Amino acid sequence: KQEVTQIPAALSVPEGENLVLNCSFTDSAIYNLQWFRQDPGKGLTSLLLIQSSQREQTSGRLNASLDKSSGRSTLYIAASQPGDSATYLCAVENYGQNFVFGPGTRLSVLP
Amino acid sequence: KAGVTQTPRYLIKTRGQQVTLSCSPISGHRSVSWYQQTPGQGLQFLFEYFSETQRNKGNFPGRFSGRQFSNSRSEMNVSTLELGDSALYLCASSLSGTGANVLTFGAGSRLTVL
């Protein structure tokens, strides 16, 4: 059974800092991995999708990497802004199964 | 391009009642999946529908059911509501539900059971 964990559970940084969020999964036979952000009381917004054959994806100030063999993914946020404050979730999809989500990292970027 | 639409956004029910939630996917998306989100359990998968067929089901009691119509719109139903069913119910749509398809989520339906 796939299990997904995220470290840290919460993070508070001053504006302008670069930061890394971590995601670990137990079953490396994944189809793809997605990173989402969720604002309080809202739905999830997809940030990046990394297919199993890829090592990283970039979108603006965001860069996500994937190391299937070690069961890890990182989300790098450059030059953080107060608008980046949200909960960040990673989700993995195994073949023939649906997405399993991590518990999320709650990020606060202080002005 | 319209996003995923969930209705109602908020609702309050009492124990023992039943509730039906609706999800309209992005045009052209044939897969709709449902998730329950609570502070204690996080996001948990309920079920996924593709072309009117339930393709996957999570570990929830039979009180939770769903269906998908020919236009890909989906509904989920919870019968005999319990206090623990209070949660944010999210639906997500994708083109085919597997592979390199990005999940697009709706804003959710927040259910409070009193």
Image (cartoon, rainbow, N blue to C red):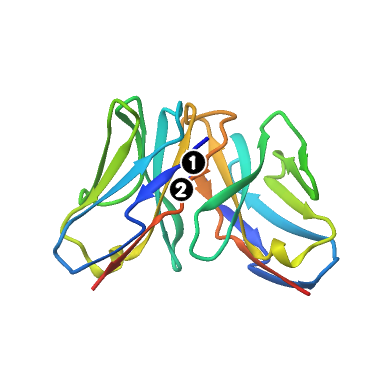
The alpha-carbon separation of the residues under discs 2 and 1 comes to: 7 Å
Instruction: Specify few, some or many for label 2: CA neighbours under 10 Å numbering under 14, 14-19, or 20 or more.
Output: many
Q: Tell me where residue B72 appears, x and y as whole percent.
A: 35, 30
The type of residue carrying mark 2 is Gly
In this rendering, the label closer to the viewer, 2 or 1: 1
Dots 2, 1 in contact, CB < 8 A: yes
Query: Does residue B88 appear to the left or right of A72 in the view shown?
Result: left
Q: Which residue is mark 2?
A: B106
Viewer-closest of A58 and A105:
A58
Q: Is residue A3 visible?
A: no
Q: Tell me where residue A1 appears, x and y as whole percent.
A: 48, 45
Q: Tell me where residue A79 appears, x and y as whole percent.
A: 85, 60
The answer as to whether the residues below labels 2 and 1 share one chain is: yes
Give the position of the C terminus of chain A as an image quadrant: bottom right
Residue B3 got which mark?
A: 1
Instruction: Specify few, some or many for label 1: CA neighbours under 10 Å numbering under 14, 14-19, or 20 or more.
Output: some
SS at mark 2 in the image: loop
**What residue lies at 34% left-to-right and 24% top-to-bottom?**
B51
Q: Tell me where residue B6 appears, x and y as whole percent.
A: 38, 48
SS at mark 1 in the image: loop
Say which quarter of the image contains residue B83.
bottom left
Q: Residue furthest front?
A: B1
Q: Is residue A56 above or below residue B106?
A: above
Residue A8 got which mark?
A: none
Q: Label 1 lies in what chain?
A: B
Q: Is residue A11 above or below residue B91?
A: below
Say which quarter of the image contains residue A38.
bottom right
Q: Label 2 lies in what chain?
A: B
The type of residue carrying mark 1 is Gly
**What residue lies at 73% left-to-right and 41% top-to-bottom?**
A66
**What residue lies at 67% left-to-right and 45% top-to-bottom?**
A71
